[in-house]
Image (cartoon, grey):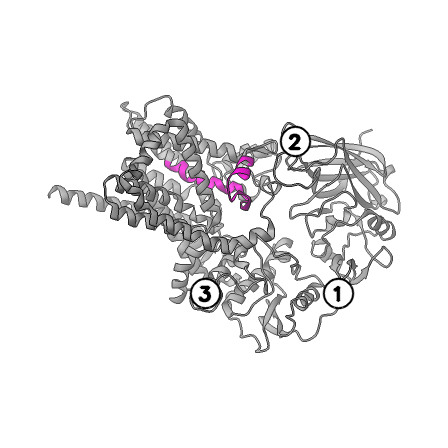
Amino acid sequence: MGLLERSRTKTALEVGMAALLCLLSLVYFYGSHLFSGPELRYTFDRFDPIIQASILEHWYGVYRGLYDWRNPIIFYPIQGALGFNDSYVLTSIPYSLLRAAGLDPLLAMEIPHAATRVIGFASAWILMRRYFGLSLWATAFGAVLLTVANGIYLGTMHTQLTTVAYAPLLFCLIARIHELLVDERRGAALFTGCVTGLLLAFWPLTSFYMFWMTGLFTIIVLGVALLLNRRLLIAMIGEALVAQRWLTLVPGLIIFAAGLYPLWLIYGPTAALTGMHQFIAVIHNAPHLVDLINVGPDNPIWSETFERLRFETVGSGLGEFELWRGFTPVHLALLALALLAAFKLPTGLPARQDFAYRCLLVTLAVGLLLLVQVGGFTLWWIVYTVVPGAKAVRVIVRFELLLVTFGAIALAIALDILARYRAPWTSLVAVVLAASVLAEQYSSFPTARFKAADVKALADIPQPPRACRTFYTVNPYRADGESAVNMKYYIHSTEAMLIAERIGLPTLLGMHTFIPPGWDLTDPLAPDYEWRVYRYAEKHHLTEGLCAFDLQDLTWRVVTTPPDRPATPPPELALAGLISPAGPISLDLRAPLAQRYGGSSLRLPCRPMAATDTSLLVCAGEPAKDAGGVGVALALRDGEHVSFARGEPGTLLLADGWSPPESWGTWASDQQASLVVRLDRSLFADGARLVLTAHALLPLQDTSKVVHVSIDDAPLGSLNLTGDPSQQDLCIPAARLPEGRAFTLTLRTDRAAQSPAALKLSGDARPLNFALSGLTVGHCQPSP
């Protein structure tokens, strides 16, 4: 066998090995999809994927000439709804081909995401093997780790985030362009540049988060490279630009620039309409220091230990789902050792690979430092202020996906360096460490959490009546253990979105990252739901041809007459948070309500209603401009919990000094803010314990803020709030509980409220002081 034949055989064996390892990685990744029962299951819950499927169905209709590309037929008649979420343009191409071939929407959506993971595996393999010159075993380890890492496994359940796999592809393409230009293969470089331009043009139209975060990662890499070895970086860039080589790059740059135009068409109006995200919302998604190793649930090696650690340091267990994207502990520890070793010991790599390796390690460290929050402060404020597009990114913890991805490549390089040292034991140690890191990635958490049968929109939907011009859904089904939030916001809306795009009938409903102003068609179980829908349709001149679709009976109904005004809702609906106002209600109205109407249970049948000339408070279906004629029972019982989030029951307790409630809770906007609370004194013979979940807006130099609390103007105690939400107890002696009436709980700080802008924390100019997100009532025995 000649040298050429042996080379081809070796290459074929390596390709076969890579394909086998990639297949095994995918089998692990999709185990819960394939082996959880007789029916195929799909990634994540049955809400976010249905939203994504509706957008992809929209594109499928666009390619068939049915729809205007910028206007999905949801939130009808709002224009530009494509800009309320990711657009999934790249995913839509294979999706539409698979739909045309007869696949159902969920399977046609899942396959492109699996293919994207294959692209990431292959790109990482080439990057490590060809451009870093790693050994075969180290390359295999890095590619597998990059694909199955715990943070990637859990963190890409939002499947648009699988496009993190395009990051190693981008760096592969950049390295290839440089290689071709240096070799004077300008035609191949031109072609590769155009492919890169297409990737950069379509990527933000598919998943803006991962595109933008990869851009941020690249900026950090270049900044680090300038600091570590400016001359070498300039020399490498110069090699690609000399002798008019730069002209080869122009077509690709033009393609990329052209792709920015549809991006602006889609998201420019949304940015103008919503103003993007305030920094206060962003910082809530910054991981704590301990979250850098947040492995989430069901990791048999680390989850239990981590949960105890996080409870001791932060005060809660694993944290919300978005935080489950951390490094595994051994992986992060080895990267820290690699960073130290890279600047203390020779790596044995060629000069340019050594330079790239050091830049990569430092970039990972800088990325983690920017991301993490300590005491409510994070360096991400620099990114938010300086980097274009940062205000569009709210869940910044997703940047960890980039760090874990390139952390896998960096660790593969580090272990390969270790294995090449002359000591006889280093190879064995490197392999053992690699095996340990792979073992700690295992998670038994089922990432596939629903079946096609769970989605009513995929059933055999009957044709709507000929009279139907637009529709909404009613009577949503409820699975066992379904949360009130899902019932309130998601089920009826997401099903309507997919039904609309499948049958081509516009719907008034929708659910996206951004919601159009004036749209309030949530709470499908509320007695006033269909009344609100009709009023909305009336406002937009859509009552003619308005139809309702029953999600349980799968039947259509033409709405020919306005629904009756709602009656008083059952108390259990109010307790579930399904009937509630947007608040806050002024003290002059709230206090008489609390004084006049009480009871043994919490009943909240009020909601705001916009009239032509005034804003009314509607209670029990009757509008009222003052307290007279308004019936509300306001007493809280032992064990009850209320949320101060927008649309939740706790907002009825708000009196003076509060800003409008937000999706997570409510800010105090003054130095003093009041709650009006009613407790049945006979039920709290030993005193009442109020557990407030609260946090404060703090100047950079402060670590906490004291809030003085009084009951009916008499001092009660104080809260010591930090920048992170925490539970604070207040015990009210039984003797101080008023009998037969409500009391005012006043919270006051020593200093006036300040805006985040004045404190140089963000551009938010609202005066903010402290915030409440929840209140729980219980018994307590005050200290003597």
* Residue 373 drawn at (x, y percent): 57, 34
Q: Earlier in the sequence, mark 2 or mark 3?
A: 3
Is 593 placed above or below 235 here? below
Q: Name the residue beneath numbered marker 1.
A: 566
Find the residue positioned furthest to the top: 344
Residue 183 in picture, x, y percent from top left? 23, 40
Q: Which residues are magenta?
A: 381-409
Residue 686: quadrant of the picture: top right
- Residue 397 part of the magenta segment: yes
Q: Quadrant of residue 573?
A: bottom right
Residue 613 among those drawn in magenta? no
Q: Residues within 10 Å of mark 1 (few under 14, many from 20)?
A: some
Q: What is the secondary structure assignment of the residue under circle 3?
A: helix
In the visual, does 279 lie left or right of 684? left
User: Can residue 299 be seen in the rendering of this structure?
Assistant: no
**Residue sticking out furthest to the bottom:** 466
Residue holding disc 2: 699
Query: Dot 2, crowdedness within 10 Å: few (<14), some or many (≥20)?
Result: some
Res. 485 visible in picture: yes
Q: Residue 62 bears which disc, if any?
A: 3
Q: Are marks 1 and 2 in contact (CB under 8 Å)?
A: no
- The amino acid beneath tag 3 is Val
Task: Check residue 110 in the rendering and tell me which mark sits there, or answer none.
Answer: none
